[in-house]
Amino acid sequence: MSSNKVVLGVLAGVAVGALAGILFAPDKGTRTRKKIMRKGEDTLDDLKDKFDDMLETFQDKFEDTKNEIEELIEKGKSVYDDAKSKYEHAKKEVKY
């Protein structure tokens, strides 16, 4: 199970637990609704932060992979150019 799924599961569990605690608390309806709204906003902010972190991690990994691929392409071109040069040189030396 990935760590992102675990984090989202924990946050969802905390949100449900907090909501249940607020609903069963002996407060007036208006205070309870305000508490629910605050908890909902806090949970939403936490989820947004986690999503932003996950997106940033994905972008970093994508950029790293892209750079590695570009390096491999450059190495491949260099090997190809060297082989082509050696072939052309050998072709000039060996005359049929």
Image (spheres, rainbow, N blue to C red):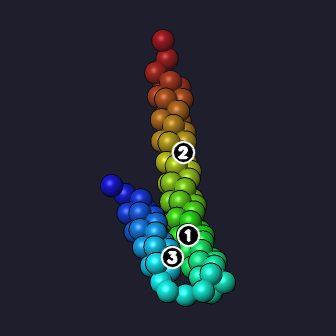
Q: Earlier in the sequence, mark 2 or mark 3?
A: 3
Residue 48 horizontal side relative to residue 21, left or right: right
| Cβ atoms at labels 2 and 3 below 8 Å apart | no
Question: What amino acid is found at the position of numbered circle 1 in the picture?
Answer: Leu
Q: CA distance from mark 1 to mark 3?
A: 22 Å
Image point (46%, 21%), residue name: 94
Residue 39 vertical position relative to residue 84 in the rendered view, above or below: below
Is residue 32 visible in this depiction of the protein? yes
Image point (56%, 66%), residue name: 51
Viewer-side residue, 40 vs 20:
20
Per the image, the residue denoted by label 1 is 47
Judged from this view, the residue extending furthest toward the left is 1
Residue 1 horizontal side relative to residue 66, left or right: left
| Label 3 CA crowd tier, 10 Å (few <14, some 14–19, many 20+) | some
Residue 35 vertical position relative to residue 72 in the rendered view, above or below: below
Question: What amino acid is found at the position of numbered circle 2 in the picture?
Answer: Ile
Per the image, the residue denoted by label 3 is 23
Mark 1 vs mark 3: give the one in front. Answer: 3
Residue 59 vertical position relative to residue 14 in the rendered view, above or below: above
Q: Earlier in the sequence, mark 1 or mark 3?
A: 3
Per the image, the residue denoted by label 2 is 73
Image point (49%, 86%), residue name: 26
Mark 2 vs mark 1: give the one in front. Answer: 1
| Image spot of residue 60 (x, y percent) | 54, 64
Instruction: Indicate the secondary structure of the residue bearing disc 3.
Output: helix
Viewer-side residue, 58 vs 50:
50
Question: What amino acid is found at the position of numbered circle 3 in the picture?
Answer: Leu
